[in-house]
Amino acid sequence: MIRTVATTPFDGQKPGTSGLRKKVPVFQQPHYVENFVQSVFDSLSEFEGETLVVGGDGRYYNREAIQTVIRIAAAAGFGRVLVGRGGILSTPAASAVIRKHGAFGGIILSASHNPGGEHGDFGIKYNIGNGGPAPEPVTDAIFARSKEITQYRISDAPDVDLDTLGITRVEDMVVDVVDPVEDYAELMGTLFDFDAIRDLFGSGFTMRFDAMSAVTGPYATAILEETLGAAPGTVVHGEPLPDFGGHHPDPNLVHAHDLYERVMAPDGPEFGAASDGDGDRNMVVGRGRFVTPSDSLAIIAANAHLAPGYRSGIAGIARSMPTSGAADRVAEKLGVKCYETPTGWKFFGNLLDAGLATVCGEESFGTGSSHVREKDGLWAVLMWLNIIAARRQGVAEIVGEHWAAYGRNYYTRHDYEEVDAAAADALVADLRARLDTLPGTVINGLTVEKADDFAYHDPVDGSVTTKQGIRVFFTDGSRIVYRLSGTGTAGATLRVYLERFEPDASRHDLDTQDALADLVEIARTLPDIEGRTGRSAPTVIT
Ligand code: G16
């Protein structure tokens, strides 16, 4: 039976950079999930009888939320729900399933790289029919609706058995529990030279893939070990756990430090990779060389033609504004355009749909392509394996040759997490107020060339997105960017991105923090980070 339940709005159901993210207890409040999901459906139209894809990264509260989504979807009139077995679907796999099955859209339960567990983070994100995150007009409509919602409609059917493949019904709606890996693995097989990668592993190539007890475990085990012949045990922390084993499932030098150390050891594996909570981020490290996400994007773009799915070349590259300019140099050489978008994968959707870009990437450990409309951790890892297999070179050699050919963009990001939100807002507002007076100023020997607040003009739909980050450019080609994160759940996170281009190959082996030391100092003092936030050092450096 379908019931109509009276409700009142909750404050703050505003989707951020990537969906609504809050602490688990916030989502556990009566009506909280229901209100948001109903607000999503109320913001859409003409989905009667259509298919909705539902799945999540397996974190705490995943199963409960999925049952609620299914009941509300049935009441709203969807014809079919495709849900991953065990409630599991990585974010890129959900995107692949939406596209392959021509679904109307999908609901993904995840807070990505944020910690999970009873007191950890949870999230709900709506993806549209192209498989990508809902664009801003849709998320704005959802938020507006959430502020005026008075009722939701929900089926009182019993829980669906999420662990058994096959079809059941909730009211008139078909619920199809599907294998979460199958469609995704099949897609990967069409893009990459699996035979060459199989030969690579067959010749004794060693790898360690850290799934961080998050969603990519089943995907990596099926593809790397069972299909491509990587040695059993290549995938570690391969079982998705509700609390990610108490770890922070964020593949970077801080939270995947163990992997980094192991690959850097002389007797370690030749190649290491990790993915995040929901499988869309990736970290790549070869013996003796960590690859920054910005370099990874550039190297993937320069070598994509080595993979069968990209043999005819790429149409263009897109990167988020804070991502380094390394990809721009590749685009120039390839004679294609490099688009610069605000942070957030949703901004790539139009470019990919219009065929303007094939490969996209972000400094926040995200890379992907037009095969889906999300960034894709395992895709990036398979692309690297394909490149390594085709070039018969290790990661360090590939990176070294890339820098020799294009120059090196030294790059680092300094995060100040959980700072007082008002102080962070004031810091950015103050920088914004100084934009006109900064050019010409000499700070620690570097002259400011120009400064602005990044605004994006979408070339496809003409929309304009403003206030996407303060950029300070120096006459020597260096750059500092300040922006506030849109994915945190406590206080504010100030991100400071620093970059300097070094064409001289004899200076390509400096330590990144040393190479950027003068910029780091300027970045700290220019907005007086310590005075305003009380923080004398960043909490995370990547
Ligand atoms: C999300 C977005 C990315 C963005 C990242 C960091 O990633 O999809 O596009 O780069 O957040 O955003 P922010 O700097 O605002 O915290 P994920 O992996 O969390 O979905």
Image: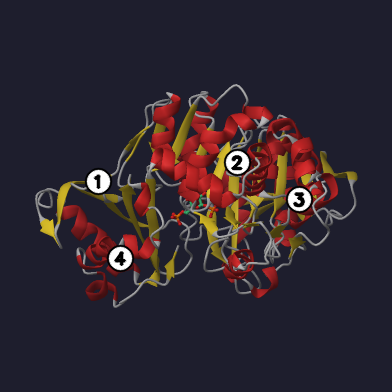
| Marks 2/1: CA–CA distance | 38 Å
Q: Amino acid at mark 3?
A: Tyr
Q: Quadrant of the C terminus?
A: bottom left
Left or right: 359 as drawn, with respect to 480: right
Choose mark 2 or mark 1, whichever is in front. 1
Answer yes or no: is residue 49 visible.
no
Q: Amino acid at mark 1?
A: Gly
What is the secondary structure assignment of the residue under circle 3? Answer: helix
Marks 4/1 in contact by CB < 8 Å: the verdict is no
Sequence order check: which comes first, mark 3 or mark 4? 3
**Does the closest atom of ligand 1 sit within 8 Å of the Cβ of label 2?**
no
**Does the closest atom of ligand 1 sit within 8 Å of the Cβ of label 3?**
no
Q: Is residue 355 above or below residue 419?
A: above
Answer yes or no: is residue 353 visible.
yes
From the image, tell me which residue sits under label 1: 477
Q: Amino acid at mark 4?
A: Ala
Choose mark 1 or mark 3, whichever is in front. 1
- Residue 129 on image: x %, y %: 63, 33
Occupied quadrant, residue 168? top right
Q: Nearer the viewer, residue 69 or 218?
A: 218
- Residue 33 on image: x %, y %: 62, 58
From the image, tell me which residue sits under label 3: 219
Choose mark 4 or mark 1, whichever is in front. 1
**Does the closest atom of ligand 1 sit within 8 Å of the Cβ of label 4?**
no
Q: Nearer the viewer, residue 238 or 55?
A: 238
- Residue 517 on image: x %, y %: 29, 65
Sequence order check: which comes first, mark 1 or mark 3? 3
User: Residue at the location (42% across, 43% down)?
Assistant: 404
- Mark 2 is surrounded, within 10 Å at the Cα level, by few (under 14), some (14 to 19) or many (20 or more) other residues, namely many
- Mark 4 is surrounded, within 10 Å at the Cα level, by few (under 14), some (14 to 19) or many (20 or more) other residues, namely many
Of all residues, the one furthest to the top in this rendering is: 312
